Image: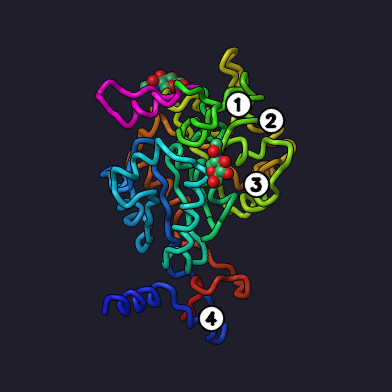
Amino acid sequence: MPQLRRLIALLAAFPLLSRALPATKYVETTPLPLVIWHGLGDSYQADGIMEVAQLAEEVNPGTYVYIIHLDDSDNGDRQATFFGNVTEQITQVCEQLASEPILSTAPAVNALGFSQGGQFLRAFVEKCNFPQVHNLVTMGSQHNGIFKFQSCDSSGDWVCRGAEALLRFGRWSDFVQSRLVPAQYFRDSNEYDSYLKHSNFLADINNEREEKNEAYKSNLLSLNRFGMFMFANDTVAVPKESAWFAEVNQLSGEITTLRERSLYTEDWLGLRALDEQGKLDFETIPGQHMELTDKLLTDVFTEYFGPVEVPDDVAALPPSLVKQGM
Ligand SMILES: *[C@@H]1O[C@H](CO)[C@@H](O)[C@H](O)[C@H]1NC(C)=O
Ligand SMILES: *[C@@H]1O[C@H](CO)[C@@H](O)[C@H](O)[C@H]1NC(C)=O
């Protein structure tokens, strides 16, 4: 009976009964599950992503790794990185993670977002945050948007060309904002009014409109740590400083860092509070967009995704982290 076997495996992974036992000494058992969201043009079964998942398991043995996908087929999942309404995609991922048995019974999960997957995972935290995210790491993500669309290479990638063709309808049209994924995080401060009015995704999750969503802030504030990695020589995600929530003026080249922006000073998202608590990390990775080495990933996984230290305060503990000590 495969169902029974699954249940037993689940119970073994998260011993629910242990909470009922008398409290003496408690230790952590296993690292939190890790959720990964890949970037534009990638797919959940691609070799690169599978290798990252495997490495995460090797660095912190016992890590359950879950790779987010918007379609069961690899092709469909890749297409969904170009096409779709991101608001609806986030809703779909919220349902997917909440209904995944191991994730939804875990006390919390860690999250790793590559490129656009990073701002989408942040949106997951702001909008749903179930399962709750403990540490969030984003690499080369466009938290403050892009002001230039990536051009497709000349290799005859029809999915990418189709996406490019959509732009003919105008980046701020509802037609494009509901269909072309990168358009939904396009942000040019020289077109700020159009952006505020029409952006289907970024203006909302960055709380840039007059009416602020307090849940976005309180959810983001529940992070234990938020590591933002920027690729030093990124010419693919433009501007690269978007990985740190900086605003770059396309015309003058002037950079306004996160700490100088209203987003921070008025703390629309809780980033200032996180920063003041030492939970917001601005990190740099040498090299081009998504140029990652095993060494770097190993360091990051050790730093952010290792076994959680369990405090003495047992009452505050989620059941699945609790195990009787010796
Ligand atoms: C995207 O989807 C959401 C939820 O269904 C909807 O409210 C919104 O209007 C859509 N965006 C556009 C630009 O059509
Ligand atoms: C990367 O950028 C740094 C400074 O930003 C520069 O000194 C270096 O030459 C660049 N490396 C490459 C490979 O472009």
Q: How many C-alpha atoms fall within 10 Å of the one at disc 2: few (<14), some, or many (≥20)? A: some
Cα–Cα gap, marks 2 and 1 = 8 Å
Q: Secondary structure at mark 2?
A: loop
Which amino acid, by three-letter code, is at mark 3? Leu
Quarter occupied by the N terminus? bottom left
Q: Which residue is mark 3?
A: 274
- Residue at 56%, 86% in the rendered image: 22
Q: Which residue is mark 1?
A: 247
Cα–Cα gap, marks 4 and 1 = 48 Å
CB within 8 Å, label 2 to label 1: yes
Cα–Cα gap, marks 3 and 4 = 31 Å
Residue 87 part of the magenta-drawn span? no
| Dot 3 or dot 4, earlier in sequence | 4
| Dot 2 or dot 4, earlier in sequence | 4
Residue 233 visible in the displayed image: no
Which amino acid, by three-letter code, is at mark 2? Arg
- Residue at 56%, 17% in the rendered image: 250
Q: Nearer the viewer, residue 198 or 281?
A: 198
Q: Is residue 221 left or right of residue 57?
A: right
Which amino acid, by three-letter code, is at mark 4? Arg
- Residue at 48%, 62% in the rendered image: 98
Residue 123 visible in the displayed image: yes
Classify 55 as above or below 245: below
Q: Secondary structure at mark 4?
A: helix
Q: How many C-alpha atoms fall within 10 Å of the one at disc 3: few (<14), some, or many (≥20)? A: many
Classify 42 as above or below 156: below
